[in-house]
Amino acid sequence: MPSRTLRTLRVAAATAAGAMVLSACTTIHPGQAVVVGDDSLSRASLDDLSVSYCALNAVISEQQAAQSGVEAATTATAGADARRQAAQAFITGTVAERTATDVGVSVRESEYVLTEEQLGQIDDAFDDADTEGVRDLLEDDRRTQLLITAIGAEELDVELSAETTEDAQATGQKAVQEAIKAEDLSIDPRLGLSESDASQVGTSGSLSVAQSTLSQAAAVDLPSLQQCL
């Protein structure tokens, strides 16, 4: 059975990858990768967050490979995928925060911060250079999911329990998606995401010049995380 840490990592990656956003805005903002109303994610910040997603995805792949006995592989688009995950996570988190404020719900820090045991597991699973970023990513994701659930519970007018949590999550997710549709959203087109629904429309995901054929070929000899970026 997968460990609690692996399940947590999978949920974080899947949540970010599956976030759906809509917008009618097509304005390009210099220096910004994503703009959600008055909030923005700079290209530099997106790259920093993408490093954490690269590390996260690599560890998930390695742990799944260890369980299945199949060698883990790094795809040629791993870096682009990580950037898209980072962009979608920023959008979902930003709008969830606003929606929670609008409906008057919040979550306590103690509900989403990682425990000492979980921090130790992250230290064991990731390189020292990646642990802080992955920790922040997981805590941010957990906070976003708790906010979404709280929003749903408020809309359903129910107390959260084992019986109501699933419905609250679904209701909250729908509410946040509807709120995203109403936002003034702009995504750098080089991320390869459609501004109509943030679905993938390209394979680049890069905010820099394209790699040369030589550098792409040389990447096969690099460690998985370096291949990702």
Image: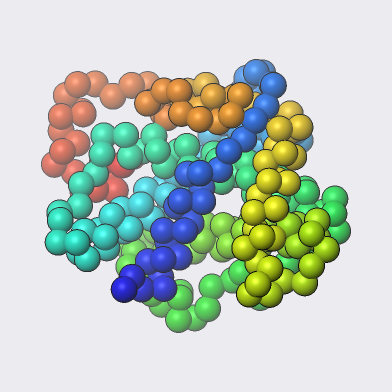
Quick check: can you spot residue 32?
A: no
- The part of the image, by quadrant, that contains residue 144 is bottom right
Quick check: can you spot residue 197?
A: yes
Q: Give the residue displayed 38% in from the left and 55% down from the top.
A: 56
Quadrant location of the C terminus in the rendered image:
top left
What is the x, y in percent for residue 135? 49, 64
Q: Give the residue displayed 37% in from the left and 66% down from the top.
A: 6
Q: Is 16 situated left or right of 93 in this image? A: left
Image label count? 0
What is the x, y in percent for residue 113? 59, 71
Colour treatment of the image:
rainbow
Q: Is 123 situated left or right of 20 in this image? A: left
Q: Nearer the viewer, residue 105 or 178?
A: 178
Q: Give the residue displayed 16% in from the left and 24% down from the top.
A: 214
What is the x, y in percent for residue 51? 41, 47
Note whether 35 is above or below 104 in the view shown: above
Q: Is 163 situated left or right of 15 in this image? A: right
- The part of the image, by quadrant, that contains residue 143 is bottom right
- Residue pushed farthest bottom? 117
Q: Give the residue displayed 38% in from the left and 25% down from the top.
A: 204
Quadrant location of the N terminus in the rendered image:
bottom left
- Residue pushed farthest front? 163
- The part of the image, by quadrant, that contains residue 100 is bottom right
What is the x, y in percent for residue 170? 64, 54
Note whether 181 is above or below 54 in the view shown: above
